[in-house]
Amino acid sequence: MLLRRDRAMTAVSIVLDVAFHAGRGTTVPAGDIADRLGEARRGIEPVLQALSRAGVLSSTRGPKGGYRLGRAARDITLAEVVAAVSGVENGALPEEAPPSPLQNLVILPLWTELEGALLEMLGGHTVAELLRRATIAGLRRPAPEALNFAI
């Protein structure tokens, strides 16, 4: 089946949000991510967990906990992000063969070919590229809080 648009786009959006909002050594709370995406926190938790299990994100527990990228943005492809939230291992049910011979012998192979081409294209794009696109679009990353050495 072609990628589930909702889950794949949510995963890419989450990873971009984390890359955009996490500073050096800081994490992004799940609640903040959900608020910015207009999603319920409960709704994005399974995606966050799958991304963490795949090593795309790393998580920190506790009151100052949250998420950060698991690797450098230039090393994370969009294909990896999508693969982390797709497939049988992430709760998707295996698909049954279509009942029609036309569907099974013509449409299904075409869909498989299209999905392969899409995944190949996603493999050529990184999170760093999305950050560059955000900058070109005029979006500014939040400035880190200035260090205060006053006692």
Image: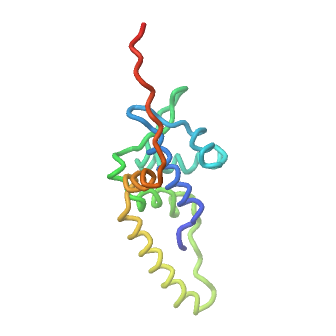
Query: What is the tally of numbered marks visible in this picture?
Result: 0
Residue sitting at 38 percent across and 61 percent down? 125
- Quadrant of res 68: top left
| Extreme-bottom residue of the structure | 102
- Quadrant of res 149: top left
Pinpoint residue 31: horizontal percent, then vertical percent: 60, 38
| Extreme-top residue of the structure | 151
Considering depth in this image, is 22 or 104 the residue closer to the camera?
Answer: 22
7 sits to left or right of 71: right
Pinpoint residue 150: horizontal percent, then vertical percent: 41, 10
Quadrant of the rendering where the C terminus is positioned: top left
Is 7 above or below relative to 115?
above
Considering depth in this image, is 139 or 44 the residue closer to the camera?
Answer: 139
Colouring mode (rainbow / by chain / secondary structure / one colour): rainbow
Considering depth in this image, is 113 or 100 the residue closer to the camera?
Answer: 113
Is 72 above or below relative to 86?
above
| Extreme-front residue of the structure | 138
Quadrant of the rendering where the N terminus is positioned: bottom right
Residue sitting at 41 percent across and 62 percent down? 79
Pinpoint residue 35: horizontal percent, then vertical percent: 63, 43
Residue sitting at 60 percent across and 49 percent down? 37
Pinpoint residue 64: horizontal percent, then vertical percent: 51, 27
